[in-house]
Amino acid sequence: MSAHAPLLKVENLGKSFGGVKAVDGISFDLAPGELLALIGPNGAGKSTTFNMVNGQLKADQGSIRFGGEELIGRKPRAIWRMGVGRTFQIAETFASLTVVENVQMALLSHDGKLFSMWRRAADHRRDEALALLDQVGMKAQADRPCSELAYGDVKRVELAIAMANAPKLLLMDEPTAGMAPKERNSLMALTKQLVIDRGMAVLFTEHSMDVVFAYADRMIVLARGRLIAQGKPLEIRDHPKVQEVYFGSGKTFEKIAEKAAEVNAAVGAATA
């Protein structure tokens, strides 16, 4: 557990669809400066949990407090304005707009001027948009249409867009889906650096366990809607229930951990 006070505190959270409990009374917290991975097999309740935190689904029970304020009952846009950013499994950008215009659109939305005609959108906070692109390594491609970008670069643009509201908490849904190993390690190393530089928190879902082990500070594991384990990666690796319902064996976990150690070493060498 981080020494910082929790930024996000989830208690006894539950959601049912008909007679099926998709999420069954889970509790966890997340502190500034942490990357927390939410993992589990298909049907574990990950997406439902994620969407309740984001406001896309309303919980049936429990509490989600962000900076001490209750999120349950608030719309996604209101939660975004409170300082919660989000990226999606399938990157969402405007393909016909340039890279910098995509970020400017997010800044316009944050300022409540998305539909205002008082000035040309192309002029709106361009320097700030370029600064955000610089942070994700995309400033040199600012004036290219998003339709021309490689998928890994589109993911970087999406990250810049998610940073437009200066989030304290960033929700990342399968951030490396569809990416090659080199691309996904580059994106997650960038995300970790942003967490360090900005002191924000990240909650992410991920199927690539090498990514989880290389970059998560802590992990929470769901199975059939219930939280079965939480802790640091090595604690989760050795947890018998996790091995049983998710990975099958400790040896599988050991191979993943070894690969993650190699990634960590490579990232450390690159940033030294």
Image (cartoon, rainbow, N blue to C red):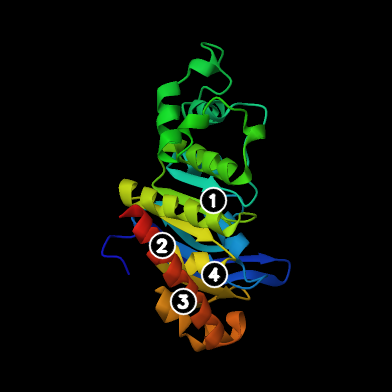
Q: Which mark is residue 209?
A: 4
Q: Is residue 262 above or below residue 6?
A: below
Q: Secondary structure at mark 1?
A: helix
Q: Is residue 85 above or below residue 271?
A: above
Q: Secondary structure at mark 2?
A: helix
Quick one: label 3 or label 4, which is nearer the N terminus? 4
Q: How far apart are the alpha carbons under marks 4 and 1?
A: 24 Å
Compare residues 201 and 149 and report the one nearer the observer: 149
Name the spot of residue 255 as percent of width and height, x first.
Answer: 52, 79
Q: Position of residue 259 (x, y in %)?
A: 49, 72
Between the C-alphas of marks 3 and 4, the distance is 11 Å
Q: Label 3 crowding class (10 Å Cα cut-off): few <14, some 14-19, many 20+?
A: some
**Residue corresponding to mark 2:** 266
Label 2 and label 3: CA atoms lie apart by 13 Å
Which quarter of the figure has residue 177?
Answer: bottom right
Q: What residue is disc 3 on?
A: 258
Residue 142 vs residue 119, the one in the foreground: 142
Q: Quadrant of the N terminus?
A: bottom left
Q: Which residue is mark 1?
A: 54
Q: Earlier in the sequence, mark 3 or mark 1?
A: 1
Query: Which of the two discs, 4 and 1, labels the residue nearer the N terminus?
Result: 1
